[in-house]
Amino acid sequence: MAKCLGPGIEAKGIYSYQERLKFTAGAFLAFSDESRPECCIELPGEACRAFGHAGVLKWFAWITEIGGRCTRVDIRLDFKGNRVGLIDAVRQSCERRELCRCRTWEPREPRTNEGERQGYSVNLGKRSKNGSGRYVRVYDKGLESEKAAEGEWERWEVEFTGDVAIQVMHRLAESPAWEEDALSLALGAVEFREHTGSRSLKRRPLASWWELLLGRIKAVTVREKRERSTLVKWGSWYRRCVMPTIDTMAEHAGMVREAVVEYFTGHERFAKRLEHAPPVVFELLDELMAVSQPTHP
């Protein structure tokens, strides 16, 4: 980092790390003593610009090579003009229930006592483990920075986190035209389609303003890779979360397990048709089939 950004300056630790070296353009390296053999590197947009695309790719390659992982990637798109109107378009579209691939949205417009806006934004999605790994902020950068009048500089900013950030990093690292791919990824974080009442997104046409904004851009949505439920994990959950309560009820009521279950279910059957069964059902059937197969010497 020092080769490109100059010498680091010691600063207070961050993100539970004890030490930190700050570089120009907001970049820093955070670390602790030998008891914690890891570090955290943060490269803001200005630092990435200083490194250049080739330099950032070298960082990606090095981090991957040493077994590191990317925890967050931000992509921002700036819209400038006399009257951009992007925030209004997003907000009105959300009000018409056109927001897709995202469950929540929040408009924000703090004002002074005189009623003047101090900021204007719409947040799409949630951060942390409750989110999808894609969090979008559409806000008036001119108001925030006090460098432009309201509506003249609006920003679309996406925070990719967790597994989604790792996928985005690899896509950008392997891309021959990373600017185009960054644009596709940023605009693919969410989607806006006409609210027709259909549960199928494919049957809902794109909102006209969104289709116009995309133009020839092919939006790419990166989803978190969720681990497939396995029979072992399901069994572990059942033993930890269900059986202790059932056994406690049975013991103190002087009943057997089966009687407790029947108390709540009666003689009703809850079995699903096989084509609608979850994966763990097929895993169990496969295991039982393997056990029942005769063995030959």
Image: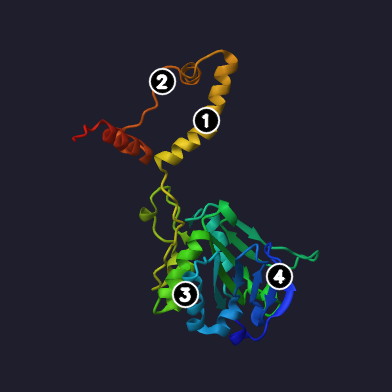
Q: Amino acid at mark 2?
A: Glu
Badge 4 marks a residue whose secondary structure is strand
Nearest to N terminus: mark 1 or mark 3: 3
For residue 242, which numbered disc appears in the image? 1
Q: Mark 1 is on which residue type?
A: Val
Mark 1, secondary structure of its residue? helix
Question: Is disc 1 in contact with disc 3, using a CB cutoff of under 8 Å?
Answer: no
- Res 61 label: 3
Task: Choose top left, top right, bottom left or bottom right for residue 20.
Answer: bottom right
- Comes first in the chain, label 4 or label 3: 4
Residue 50 vertical placement versus 64 (above, below):
below
Kindly indicate whether the residue at mark 2 contacts the one at mark 3 (C-beta within 8 angstroms).
no
> CA gap, disc 2 to disc 4?
61 Å
Query: Is residue 81 visible in this depiction of the protein?
Result: no
Q: Which mark is residue 19?
A: 4
Name the outermost residue toward the right: 113
Q: Name the residue carrying label 2.
A: 268
Pointer 2 or 4: first along the chain = 4
Q: How is the image coloured?
A: rainbow
Q: Position of residue 6 (x, y in %)?
A: 65, 86
Amino acid type, label 3 = Ala
Q: Is residue 187 above or below residue 128?
A: below
Residue 111: x %, y % from top left: 74, 64
Pinpoint residue 91: horizontal percent, then vertical percent.
57, 61
Marks 1 and 4, how far apart at CA: 45 Å
- Which of the two residues, 171 or 211, is positioned nearer the viewer here? 171
| N-term mark: 1 or 2 | 1
Nearest the eye: 127 or 48: 48
Q: Is residue 36 left or right of residue 221?
A: right
